[in-house]
Image (tube, rainbow, N blue to C red):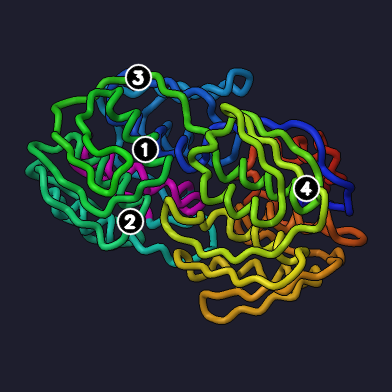
């Protein structure tokens, strides 16, 4: 198997570019199947999940091309598409569930294998199903598949989500834009990636009011049209590079970001003692001393993102002082903490809280990256640990970070991808 071989490195310095957001591009690709014709996405990250989603769309009958040179994906959607997403693909990536709403809207039916993806919690689909049922769907499961039918078509409805779930918001909104009549969807997720999806749907001809707020008002239309859309920058990747600069006491300029999407993150990073400057689509993060520990509580946007929680635990593990990290979204997100402890981190878990006491030094060891962000965080920890750290399950990191090793080595890190 492959692993990242990480040695202690000096301060990371230099420049890095942030591509389009993983958590947006996959949903935009799914939305493309709602309109016959050629849809083009630009600023697409070079990650494994894009290839998995591309293959899923091909099996539905689409022609998909990913040009790595121009960071562009083109999706040619036929007049008739399939409605079944098979387990061998869906199990690799939970974002596959995002084709559910578009398929029901376009075909009136969908058979979707129950999804896999990161081992960070159950992330049930009840909220998705409740919203689709109010729009006129009949839902049941059999043989590991969700079977969704809208024999009489979709109709507008008043929907209040029990929780501002990103995935449920996406599926309900994509179904509602092609439903007959008006829909009000309350307590929706407000993440920048949701805004990005809604903006693309509007460019395709959808009628959505309240974008960026907790209530969306949707007037159904008969059809959507293909479009060209630029994917919003990946705020999680940007945050990862910023934390890398702080942990290694380095100086990194991050290009292609949208600082306004990262207000709380940047505030917390400044609390560590880092100097952060933002100009247009550029962030400069520099650190000249050992960071100070900071408390973190993950919440739906605009709260602190759960996808940066592991990186912050890694930072707090080598900071001065103690910190409490509270995880409110995914019950198994702390799985990686046991791996971080193998590097010598002083971490204690109590329910959905993690107490971190900063240490002067971590020590290298073999560890396993249990999900996308855990893998990246363990590599960052390895950069400030004595001796050598091997991080296995590198495919998780490949799912969320473009050219991860190349970007790190370009900043001066001592990291290699090796065969174990």
Q: Earlier in the sequence, mark 2 or mark 3?
A: 2
Task: Tell us which disc is closer to us: 3 or 1.
Answer: 1
Residue for badge 1: 195
Q: Main secondary structure of the magenta part?
A: helix
- The residue that disc 3 covers is 227
Q: CA distance from mark 4 to mark 1?
A: 32 Å
Mark 2 and mark 4 in contact (Cβ < 8 Å)? no
What label sits on residue 287 in the rendered view? 4
Q: Is residue 91 above or below residue 219?
A: below
Question: Which of these two is toward me, 265 or 347?
Answer: 265
Q: Examine the rendered structure and indicate whether residue 293 appears above or below residue 48.
A: below
Give the quarter of the image for residue 174. Answer: top left
Dot label at residue 164: 2
In the image, residue 235 lies at what x, y percent?
55, 41
Labels 3 and 4 touching (C-beta < 8 A) = no
Q: N-terminal of the two: label 4 or label 1? A: 1
Question: CA–CA distance between discs 3 and 4?
Answer: 42 Å
């Amino acid at each position: 198997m492959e692993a990242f071989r990480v040695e202690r490195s000096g301060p990371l310095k230099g420049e890095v570019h942030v591509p389009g957001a993983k958590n947006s591009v996959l949903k935009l690709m799914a939305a493309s199947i709602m309109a016959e014709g050629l849809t083009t996405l630009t600023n697409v990250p070079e990650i494994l999940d894009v290839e998995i989603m591309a293959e899923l769309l091909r099996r539905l009958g689409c022609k998909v091309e990913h040009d790595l040179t121009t960071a562009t994906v083109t999706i040619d959607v036929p007049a008739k598409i399939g409605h079944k997403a098979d387990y061998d693909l869906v199990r690799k990536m939970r974002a596959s569930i995002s084709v559910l709403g578009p398929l029901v809207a376009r075909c009136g039916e969908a058979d979707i294998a129950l999804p896999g993806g990161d081992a960070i919690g159950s992330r049930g689909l009840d909220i998705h199903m409740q919203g689709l049922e109010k729009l006129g769907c009949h839902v049941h499961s059999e043989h590991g598949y969700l079977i969704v039918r809208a024999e009489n078509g979709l109709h507008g409805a008043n929907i209040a989500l029990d929780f501002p779930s990103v995935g449920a918001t996406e599926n309900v909104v994509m179904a509602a834009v092609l439903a007959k009549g008006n829909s009000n969807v309350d307590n929706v997720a407000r993440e920048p990636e949701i805004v990005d999806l809604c903006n693309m749907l509007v460019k395709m001809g959808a009628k959505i009011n309240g974008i960026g707020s907790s209530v969306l008002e949707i007037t159904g239309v008969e059809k959507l049209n293909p479009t060209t859309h630029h994917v919003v920058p990946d705020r999680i990747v940007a945050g990862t590079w910023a934390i890398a600069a702080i942990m290694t006491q380095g100086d990194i300029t991050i290009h292609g970001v949208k600082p306004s999407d990262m207000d709380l993150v940047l505030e917390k990073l400044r609390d560590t003692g880092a100097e952060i400057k933002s100009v247009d689509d550029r962030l400069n993060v520099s650190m000249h001393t050992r960071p100070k520990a900071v408390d973190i509580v993950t919440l739906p946007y605009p709260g602190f993102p759960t996808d940066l929680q592991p990186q912050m635990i890694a930072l707090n593990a080598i900071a001065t002082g103690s910190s409490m990290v509270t995880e409110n979204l995914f019950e198994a997100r702390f799985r990686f903490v046991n791996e971080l402890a193998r590097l010598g981190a002083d971490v204690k878990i109590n329910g959905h809280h993690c107490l971190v006491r900063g240490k002067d030094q971590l020590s290298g060891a073999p560890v396993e990256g249990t999900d996308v962000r855990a893998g990246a965080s363990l590599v960052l920890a390895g950069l400030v640990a004595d001796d050598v750290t091997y991080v296995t399950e590198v495919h998780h990191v490949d799912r969320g970070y473009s050219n991860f090793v190349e970007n790190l080595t370009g900043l001066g890190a001592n990291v290699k991808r090796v065969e174990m």
